[in-house]
Image (cartoon, rainbow, N blue to C red):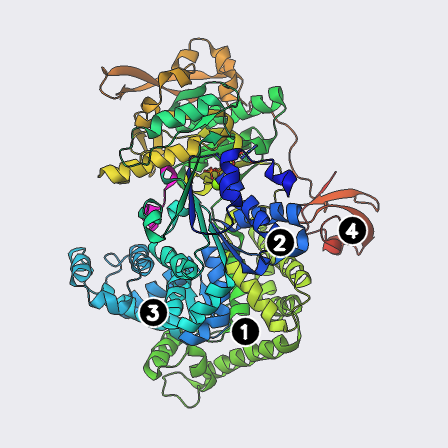
Amino acid sequence: MEKYLSQLNEAQLAPTIQKDGPMIVIAGAGSGKTRVLTYRIAYLMSQGVDSFNILALTFTNKAAKEMKGRIADIVGDGEAKNLWMGTFHSVFAKILRFEGHHLGFPSNFTIYDTQDSQKLMGSIIKEKGLDKDIYKTKQVYSRISSYKNSLITVKAYFNNPELMEADAMARRPRMGEIYQEYVDRCFKAGAMDFDDLLLRTNELLTRFPNVLAQYQNKFRYILVDEYQDTNHSQYLIVRALADRFQNICVVGDDAQSIYAFRGANINNILNFQKDYDDVKLYRLEQNYRSTQNIVNAANSVIEHNQTKLDKEVWTANDEGEKIKVHRSLTDGDEGRFVASTIWEGKMQNQLKNSDFAILYRTNAQSRSIEDALRKRDIPYRIYGGLSFYQRKEIKDVTAYLRLILNPADEEALKRVINYPGRGIGQTTIDRLVVAANGYGKTIFEVLENIDKVDININGGAKNKLKDFVTLIKSYQVMNQTANAFDLAEHVTKTSGLIREFNKDGTPEGVTRLENVEELLNGIKDFVEGQLELADASDSLAEFLEDVALATDLDADKGDEDHVALMTIHLAKGLEFNNVFIVGLEEDLFPSAMSMNTRSELEEERRLFYVALTRAEKKAYLTYALSRYRWGKLVDSEPSRFIEEIDDEYLDIITPIEERRINPMLSADIFGDVNPNKIRYKPAKQVVLKKGNTAKKEVEKFQVTTPKNLKKVTNTNGNTNLFDSKLVVGNVVKHIRFGTGEVLKIEGAGADIKAEINFQHGGVKKLLLRFAKLEVV
Ligand code: ATP
Ligand code: MG
C-alpha cells in the first residue's frame, strides 16, 4: 500500500487516509478526485475494513469497472470482487431484488428501459383518447421522470395545486391521471423504470426502518464520485444510508455540474457541509491531466460564471501548444478539417486512433464528422447512440426472456405476442389490454383464462392465444433447470425469431442474425462467469438486469483502436490525448434552448469547461459559418465561449477562405480530393457577426468535386474471414474475446466453424459466417 500512497501528492493523500467521518473533496478537473476515491477504497481495505462494507457510487458502469480493476491491482482480485460498486441504478436495482417484496414487487421484477416506458405511456395516452400532439410521449415521459426524481409521488402530485396548475397551463390538465395510470400499470406488470429504481429505494428506506438499519450497517463506508451531478432522489438515499456511521466521502467539482436538465441539483455539493457534523473539506489544486495552456484556458472561461466556488487549478505539466481555433465554411468542411488533422496526427506523431476524441453538443452533429472520417478510412465509434441491447432484434429476444421470468411484464408481452407473426391481430391485443384492465389482472393472466373471461375474441383467435401461452409456459419449465444460455438459444430457435430474421436474406437480416449470435455469446460469457449461482433462473434475472442498465459506454471493451465520438455529457470523467470540440457556434453551443436564463447559460459554460478539460495534450475548437440543421442550411456565428478564452492561449489557424487563394493549402482539408480539381463557385453572401464588432462580409463557396477522383485510402478495414482462407495456427482477433489461436476448422460452406483458443474467454467455437475476426 505504501507504494501506492506514494503515487499521491500531499493534498490527495490527506483525504485518502482520513479513515472515518464525513468529508468532501472539491476540486477542479483532472486534479485526481477519482484517483483519490480509488486509492481511498484500497487504503480502507488495507486498514482492515471489510470489502463487503464498502459502497462506491460512480457515474457510469464503465467508471466502476475501471475503478474495481485498479483496486484489484492494489489489493488483489478476490477482495475487490466483494466491493459494492456501480452506478446508483445498478446498485439499488440489486438491493431491490432482495427487498422489493416489501413494496409488493417480485424479486424478478422487470426493469423498463426508456423505450419500454415511452411505449407504455404512448398506449396510455391512446387508451385515454388524448391528443397525442399535445400529450407528446417524450414530454410526458420527461415530466413524469422529473416528478419521480424530485420524489413527487402520484399522491403528492394531487396534493400540489401548483404542479397541477403548471401542467394545465401547458395544456396537459390530465397529466396526473396519466401518471397515476402509468404507475399502476408498472406495478401490475412487476416492472420498475429507471427512476423507480431510485424512488422505490427511497420508499423502501423510509417505510421500512429495519431494512434501512440493515443497509446502514452493511455500508459502513460510502464513497460517491461526481457528486455534483446527483439528483434529489440520489441525495436522499446517500443521506439515509450514511446517517448511522457518517463515514461518507464525496468528491466533485461544482464547475462540472452539467445534468441540471435531468434533475441534478448542484446544491447537493454546495450544501454538503451542512448535512453532517464536522465535515472535513479538502481541495486539490494540481491538475495532472492537461497542459498549462489547456488548464489556463479552461480557467479563463469558467471565470465568466457568477455561481461558482472559488478554486485554484494549476499544473506542473508542460506549457503545451496553444489551443487551435478553426473556422470553416460549412459543417462538411469542419468534418474534413477534423479528419485530415487526425490523419496527419497519426502520420506525423505516431498517434493511435484512440488518442482522439471528437466531442459535440448534440448527437445530430456526428453525421458530417462521420462522413469525413469514413472517407479517410479512420475507424471511429459513436458512443451514446442506440446501445447494443436496444436494437430491435436484441429487444425481441430479451422480451421473450423477460416474459419467461416475469409473465406480468406487459411491454414484453405486447412485443412478442404476435412476433414472429402468429395471426394475432392488433384488435385482439387491444381487447386483451381492456379486459386485463377491467379485471385488474395482467394480460398473461387473462390469456391463461381466455375461455373464462368475458371477451369478444373468436374461437380461432383464442386457439392461437392458447398456443402462445403454451409456448411461454414450456420455456418457463425449461428455465427451472436449464442455464440462461441454453434457454436463450432454445428460445431463438423455437419461437421462430431466427427464421424471421433469416427470411428476408437482406444484409440487414444478416446483421440481425449476427447480433443475435453476439447476444448469445454474451449470455454464454455471463453464464460462465456465474457458475457459482445455484439457481439457474437467477442467472437469467441477473443477465437481464445488466442488459437493462447497460449503456453504450459500457460496451466498450477497450480493445479496439478507434476515434471516439460522443456528446460532451457522456465524456465527463474521461480523458483523451487530443480533443476536438466541434460546432462551437451560437445557438448550437451554447444551445439556443439554454439561453433564456443566466443559470442555463452557466450550465452550458460548465459543459464547455468539461469538454475542454478532457484534453491532455491538444485541444481544437472548430466552428462553421453555415451548417445543415433540421434539413436547412443555416448561418451561424462563432460561440461566445471561444471569445471568453484569453487570447494568449489561442492560435487562430488559417481560415478556410484564405486557403482558397492557394488551392494546394486545401489539400489537407479536402483530403481525398485532388485539390487542383476543386472548383469554387461563389454562392450567396453571408454576414458574419462576431460579438459586437463590426460586421464582416464573408463570401461563401460551394465546392464541386469532379466525379471519379482517386480516393486516398489506408488499410484499417476488418477482414471478414468467411471469404478468406483461415488455417489452423492462424492468430486472429475478435472484438469481444481479443486475440486467439485457431485450433480446428470444421464444416463446409456457410457452416464453417473454427475452434479458437482466446486469451480472454478460453476455447470457443465460432461460425465464421458470423464471427467478426481479423487475422493478426
Ligand atoms: P475529472 O474532474 O475530470 O473527473 P479527476 O479530478 O477525477 O478529473 P482523475 O481522473 O482522478 O481526476 O485524474 C486525472 C489524471 O491525472 C489521471 O490520468 C490520473 O491518473 C492522473 N493523476 C492524478 N493524480 C496524480 C498524481 N498524484 N500523480 C500522477 N498522476 C496523477
Ligand atoms: Mg473524475
Q: Earlier in the sequence, mark 4 or mark 3?
A: 3
Question: First in sequence: mark 3 or mark 2?
Answer: 2
Q: Give the range drawn in magenta.
A: 255-266
Q: Which of 571 and 156 lies nearest the eye of the viewer?
A: 156
Q: Mark 3 points at which residue?
A: 183
Instruction: Please tell me which of labels 4 and 2 falls first in the chain.
Output: 2
Determine whether 586 is above or below 241 in the image.
above
Tell me the amino acid under the disc marked 3. Answer: Val
Q: Which amino acid does label 4 sit on?
A: Asn
Disc 1 target residue: 404
Closer to the chain start, of discs 1 and 2, is: 2
Q: Where is residue 618 in the image (x, y as percent from the top left)?
A: 50, 24
Image height check: is 2 above or below 767? above
Where disc 2 sits, the SS reads helix
Q: Name the residue under label 4.
A: 757
Q: Does the magenta stretch include residue 659?
A: no
Q: Position of residue 19 (x, y in %)?
A: 51, 49
